[in-house]
Image (spheres, rainbow, N blue to C red):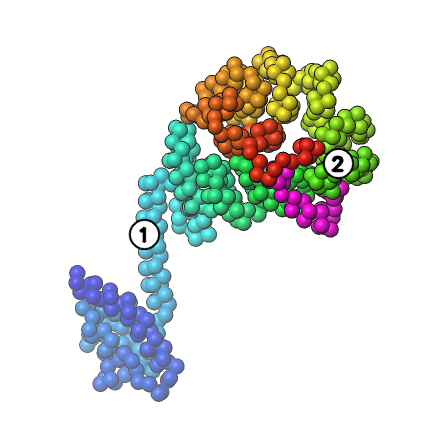
């Protein structure tokens, strides 16, 4: 056995060594002596012995290096004349290729068996074919995503986050895993959450819009208005399809941060995507600087017909805030059908009637909305009642929902949390307790944070900022806006002009 291993070792190095020497012999014909034949022999075929094989344990094995070696009447001899000795690179290639292929197969089978034993859903092709190797980390990522989902379902949040981290580590292209991590870290580790969002923006440009929207929601919910303003400014210029939502976000966040620098920067920007908002920005800055008369004159003008729909929304809303409700309603009524969408129209009419104490018109509009109630309209009604608390109208809304039914599911959870916050805002404690209990019962975890939410609305907590718990509530963006307006907490930049309260 030892001799066999020794000859195997001699074969491994002998293939390149002897083939190289014989190649040089052929290239230097006549100037170099034969490298492997015995020099004391004649050099003729079938008469000349082989010097290269004499040290082998079994010299005949040297035929794997040089097939010219044969068994003659005088023992092992070379079957070629000295001048005809030649290399056999093909045999060397087959030996090394076959050896490497065998080792590769062994490694593939070993790795495949190991991964399948752990539970990774990999195929033998994923492990064996280099073009499919990227499937292996994806399978490992999927494995940890499944473990994470099971952990979250069992209420093991820390374990779920650990497994999700592993999933994203193994497959950074797993956008959903990265986004879920960013969302889950936003309450407890906001800095880490921001790092994930920045990485998602960099690594997944095809998901830029979704990432920016989710990051803005996270920043807004925890009250990081300066950074949220930067995101909104950037997307106002970059995301033309949603620029109307982003300009509203920019106005809202800069108002609460107390910094108008980004608005002035956008006003100085002469690109077409910025110019369409200049009229809105000029009016907003007039209101913020207390130049109400000039702002009112700007709002009283007929704004261009080609102005974006949000510009009209802003104009009407600002007139309402200034107390000029008739002019605001006239401007709203003068808009062509479809110019202002349903949600915006309902929002403006409810605000106009409530702000200027038109209870009859307010009730009529509320009744009209209830006749065609759907989740988006429930959201609008809740946002209005948070800004303008009215227990009677809220009771009417809840009665209508109870009568027609609203299933509590993953899709409708945001509406139920909106109803919870609205109950707290209007001071309806029985419904506040009822909604909190229903949400706790529907949750797979104790959801103790709902107790903090209840205490906040009852005024039993020292914390006065709604953003202390908004990150843990899956609320629609409009509800977050309304809650932050209603419960802004201590301001850092002084009191804002009353006329600039809403946009």
Q: Residue 241 sits in which quadrant?
A: top right
Asked if the magenta segment contains residue 257, the reply would be yes
Q: Position of residue 25 (x, y in %)?
A: 35, 81
Q: Nearer the viewer, residue 152 or 303?
A: 303
Q: Position of residue 328 (x, y in %)?
A: 77, 28
Residue 292 badge: 2
Q: Position of residue 265 (x, y in %)?
A: 67, 49
Relative vertical location of residue 245 with respect to residue 8 in this rendering, above or below: above
For marks 1 and 2, the one nearer the N-term is 1
Mark 1 lies on residue = 106
Which residue: 72% across, 19% down?
357
Q: Nearer the viewer, residue 321 or 316?
A: 321
Question: Range of the magenta residues?
Answer: 254-279
Relative vertical location of residue 257 with respect to residue 438 in this rendering, above or below: below
Which residue: 73% across, 51% down?
270
Q: Residue 368 sits in which quadrant?
A: top right
Residue 404: in sight, yes or no?
A: no
Tell me if 287 is positioned left or right of 495 in this view.
right
Residue 417 badge: none
């Amino acid at each position: 056995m030892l001799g066999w291993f020794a000859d195997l070792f001699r074969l491994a190095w002998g293939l390149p060594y002897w083939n190289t020497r014989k190649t040089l012999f052929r290239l230097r014909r006549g100037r170099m002596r034969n490298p492997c034949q015995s020099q004391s022999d004649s050099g003729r075929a079938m008469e000349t012995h082989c010097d290269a094989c004499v040290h082998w344990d079994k010299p005949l094995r040297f035929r794997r290096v040089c097939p010219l070696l044969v068994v003659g009447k005088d023992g092992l001899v070379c079957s070629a004349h000295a001048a005809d000795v030649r290399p056999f690179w093909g045999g060397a290639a087959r030996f090394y290729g076959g050896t490497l292929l065998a080792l590769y197969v062994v490694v593939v089978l070993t790795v495949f068996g190991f991964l399948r034993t752990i539970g990774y859903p990999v195929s033998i092709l994923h492990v064996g074919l280099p073009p499919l190797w990227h499937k292996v980390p994806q399978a490992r990522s999927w494995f940890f995503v499944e473990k994470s989902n099971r952990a979250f379902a069992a209420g093991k949040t820390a374990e779920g986050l650990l497994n999700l981290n592993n999933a994203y580590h193994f497959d950074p292209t797993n956008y959903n895993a990265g986004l879920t991590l960013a969302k889950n870290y936003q309450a407890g580790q906001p800095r880490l959450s921001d790092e994930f969002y920045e990485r998602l923006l960099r690594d997944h440009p095809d998901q830029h819009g979704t990432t920016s929207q989710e990051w803005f929601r996270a920043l807004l919910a925890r009250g990081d208005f300066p950074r949220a303003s930067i995101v909104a400014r950037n997307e106002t210029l970059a995301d033309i399809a949603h620029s109307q939502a982003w300009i509203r976000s920019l106005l809202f966040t800069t108002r609460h941060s107390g910094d108008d620098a980004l608005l002035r920067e956008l006003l100085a920007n002469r690109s077409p995507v910025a110019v369409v908002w200049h009229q809105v920005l000029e009016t907003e800055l007039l209101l913020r600087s207390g130049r109400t008369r000039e702002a009112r004159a700007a709002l009283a003008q007929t704004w261009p017909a080609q102005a974006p729909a949000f510009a009209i929304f802003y104009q009407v809303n600002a007139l309402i805030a200034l107390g000029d409700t008739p002019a605001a309603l006239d401007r709203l009524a003068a808009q062509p059908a479809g110019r202002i969408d349903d949600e915006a129209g309902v929002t403006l009419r409810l605000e106009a009637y409530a702000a200027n104490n038109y209870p009859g018109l307010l009730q009529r509009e509320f009744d009209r909305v209830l006749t065609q109630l759907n989740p988006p309209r429930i959201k609008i009604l809740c946002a209005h009642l948070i800004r303008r608390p009215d227990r009677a109208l809220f009771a009417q809304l809840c009665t209508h929902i109870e009568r027609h039914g609203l299933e509590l599911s993953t899709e409708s959870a945001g509406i139920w949390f909106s109803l919870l916050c609205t109950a707290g805002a209007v001071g309806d404690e029985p419904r506040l307790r009822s909604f909190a209990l229903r949400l706790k019962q529907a949750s797979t975890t104790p959801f103790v944070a709902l107790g903090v939410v209840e205490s906040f609305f009852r005024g039993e907590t020292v914390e006065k900022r709604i953003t202390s718990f908004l990150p843990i509530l899956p609320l629609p963006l409009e509800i977050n806006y309304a809650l932050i307006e209603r419960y802004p907490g201590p301001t850092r930049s002084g009191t804002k002009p009353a006329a600039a309260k809403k946009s």
